[in-house]
Amino acid sequence: MTSIEIHDEIHTQLHETARVDYRKPIIHNASVPVLYEEALKYEKGTALTDSGALVTDSGTKKGRSPKDKRIVDEPASRNDIWWGPVNTQMTENAFMVNRERAIDYLNTRERLYVFDGFAGWDPKYRIKVRVVCARAYHALFMNNMLIRPTEAELASFGEPDFTIFNGGEFPANRYTTGMTSTTSVSINFDRHEMVILGTQYAGEMKKGVFTVMHYLMPKAGVLSLHSSANEGPNGDVSLFFGLSGTGKTTLSADPNRFLIGDDEHCWSDDGIFNIEGGCYAKCIDLSPEKEPEIFAAIRFGSVLENVVYDHASRKVDYANSALTENTRCAYPIEFIPNAKIPCVGGHPSNIILLTCDAFGVLPPVSKLSADQAMYHFVSGYTAKIAGTEDGITEPQATFSTCFGAPFLVLHPMRYAEMLAAKMQEHKADAWLINTGWNGGPYGVGKRVALKYSRAIIDGDIATREKLAKLFVEHFVSYADKASKEVIAAGPQV
Ligand code: ATP
Ligand code: MN
């Protein structure tokens, strides 16, 4: 079943649900070497690097296209959705036109790839996801990013809970109702389907699954969060919130802690769980000295997107942003040596809000009260730096509510209120960490060195408690003459 073969059950399902051509060879949950060979044989811009990673080219789109994302306006989900610029409406008919266009395109291909996997490490909440695509690159990407099923789980997979039809090499028709470009990324919650046209950027699939979890999980009383997570040797869990480029992936891969996940988590009554089976790390300026764990994860099995490499030696030039600033690598989470499998943990003790402040105003670390934590969570301040989104080439101040507005489905306050309640119930401490500029704004000051951000997170959070205690102990001798207000202005420990 995990090789290239005609597989009756999947053919029947795809034919019945999507009119996918019966005679098409379907390469279903193929092994990594098979997908490597397929990609190298059939896909332009594909190559092997000297470390064994597969280099791929995502075409003209080298980042997500948030302006081309659409959610179908249909009765079952209509009243739950936070309509607006993040969730732009699309008619059911326009969705079906796009779906048909994607499937027609897929039917013109000589071979199709299907990957079946799970989203969510907690078996209670996990969903079955199916990816149907025309590129081995996309199948391998989702093999790395979803939770890979065992042989037995695959054999009993049955019908998926959510299906992605990726016809990204083929454009949307601009005359289809509601289309404003040739790129379309659309989700229909009632049909449990996503359709991609006009972008081959694989991150759209990953974030599509995340969007679905943002719809389904809160309905099940589980909070979905744009965050990374790791666990200390004593089992204490830290969650790191932050927008793109603030350091979730980089800072969660900490040699002193166990990695639970780098981008998407859920917080249930039992603790936290990662949604994904892999990580998606930025590669620009990556070095083995600064980020040894991530550097070493770029090996056989990894998908390396849009990097420049030397054609003779096959060495990657990580400093080269000629194709995009947003060079990326997708690898299975177990490629990080201290990953925690299964990727679950207890209730978080520290909530770390990461922000990359381009104005150089915020201090490197601040302790937040519960209300301040909420304020910053709802604000979601950062500077967008060159990277994940198309068209951003220099820092730009931005606010993205819940540190993840592009992926929210319900009203932001639904997530914020759940977070406030959970933080209070589990007495989590909250911190604001500026991984951005210091000593002046962008252009004048410098970005806080990664080693300092790491040191702050690993050491200073504890040291701060120590210093605060010294303040309180020292102040005791003046307390009888000082007003209540002045005493209250000191650190609270
Ligand atoms: P995304 O949501 O797009 O995956 P992310 O929050 O995971 O974004 P990272 O991939 O960790 O962000 O990107 C942070 C980038 O900033 C990395 O390239 C890292 O090397 C760089 N960097 C520079 N200084 C710091 C710092 N002080 N803390 C964290 N990252 C830093
Ligand atoms: Mn990341």
Image: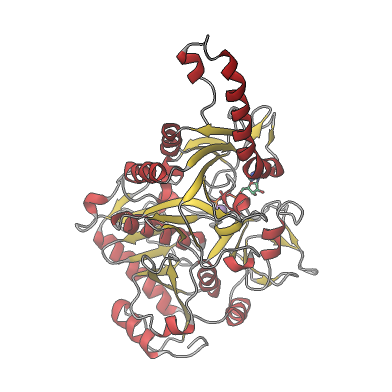
Image location (x, y in percent) of residue 328: 61, 58
Image location (x, y in percent) of residue 46: 64, 71
Pick the residue in front: 174 or 417: 417
Q: From the viewer's perspective, is residue 11 above or below residue 56?
A: below
In the picture, measured across the screen, residue 86 lies left or right of residue 436, that is left
Q: From the viewer's perspective, is residue 465 above or below residue 182?
A: above
Res 111 visible: no
- What is the residue that sits farthest to the left in this orientation? 75
Pick the residue in front: 168 or 29: 29
In the picture, measured across the screen, residue 397 lies left or right of residue 54, that is left
Pick the residue in front: 69 or 216: 216
Residue at figure coordinates x 54%, y 46% from the top left: 391
Pick the residue in front: 190 or 377: 377
- Quadrant of the rendered structure where residue 179 is? bottom left
In this rendering, the count of numbered labels is 0
Image location (x, y in percent) of residue 267: 41, 54
- Quadrant of the rendered structure where residue 354 is? top right
- What is the residue that sits farthest to the top in this orientation? 481
Res 73 visible: yes
In the picture, measured across the screen, residue 8 lies left or right of residue 367, that is left
What colour scheme governs how the chains and residues are painted in the rendered image of this protein?
A: secondary structure
Residue at figure coordinates x 51%, y 55% from the top left: 263
Image location (x, y in percent) of residue 98: 34, 65
